[in-house]
Every structure is written in C-alpha cells, then in structure tokens.
Amino acid sequence: MTNQKPTTYVADRVGDLVIAKDPDAVLDYPFDWTAWLALNGDDQIASAEFVVDPSLTIVDQAFDATSATVWLSGGTKPATGPNKLRVTCRITTNNTPPRIDDRSVFLKILER
C-alpha cells in the first residue's frame, strides 16, 4: 500500500475541514455558499474577502452569486502546535441590511 496524501477536505478529530497543500503549489480553494444562501431567500454574494495565514500568499480571488474562490501559494508548517493554516472566506450578501458570514478551512502543509 502506498502512502497517499489527502486530495479532498477531510474533517479532523475536532471537526475542522483540512486539506493537504504542498508549499510550492499554487491552487484554488472554492467555498460554495449555495445551501446557506438558499436558507435566506434570494440573497446573493455581493462581495467576498479572504483572510489567510501570513505564510500564505493570495494569488487571485473571485466570486459569483453563490460561491467564492481563492488561489493560494506558499505556506509554512508552523514551528509549534498543529500543522493547520486557516483560510477564511467572509461574504457579504446583497440583502438590505446585508448578511455577513464566515467559513474557514485549514491547509496542512506537506511536501508532496
């Protein structure tokens, strides 16, 4: 059996969604807000911003009515504590007043 690294998000033992990332990779990380938006009527995403660990670099970002995506490069395994770098997507809806919410995932830095 080969040692396979995760290629999709998996929930860790505390329930955080984690995916492996090589520090040299430049990859896109999508956030699908469709289900959450459906609970709030006709809301759509009016803006999206991303807050990431300082060792990551935002290469690009985009959003549409129901999803937001960030492209990231870099990443350094923390010297202490768990090997998890937080990536947070914060959206604002077109509702009046606007709804604002966050979702986070975590990147586990691994040489692949």
Image (cartoon, rainbow, N blue to C red):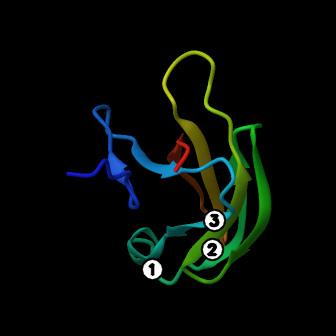
Q: Is residue 75 above or below residue 82?
A: below
Name the amino acid type tagged 1. Gly
Name the amino acid type tagged 2. Asn
Q: Residue at x 57, y 55 (%)?
A: 101
**Which numbered disc, 2 or 3, marks the residue closer to the eye?**
3
Q: Position of residue 82 (x, y in %)?
A: 48, 24
Q: Residue at x 27, y 52 (%)?
A: 2
Observer-nearest residue: 18 or 99? 18
Q: Earlier in the sequence, mark 2 or mark 3?
A: 3
What mark, if any, has residue 41 been given in the picture? Answer: 1
Pointers 1 and 2 in contact (C-beta within 8 Å): yes
Callout 1 secondary element:
loop
Q: Is residue 1 above or below residue 28?
A: above
Q: Which residue is mark 3?
A: 27
Q: Earlier in the sequence, mark 1 or mark 2?
A: 1
Callout 3 crowding tier (Cα within 10 Å): few <14, some 14–19, many ≥20: some
Q: Is residue 109 above or below residue 99?
A: above
Q: Which residue is mark 2?
A: 95
Count of picture labels: 3
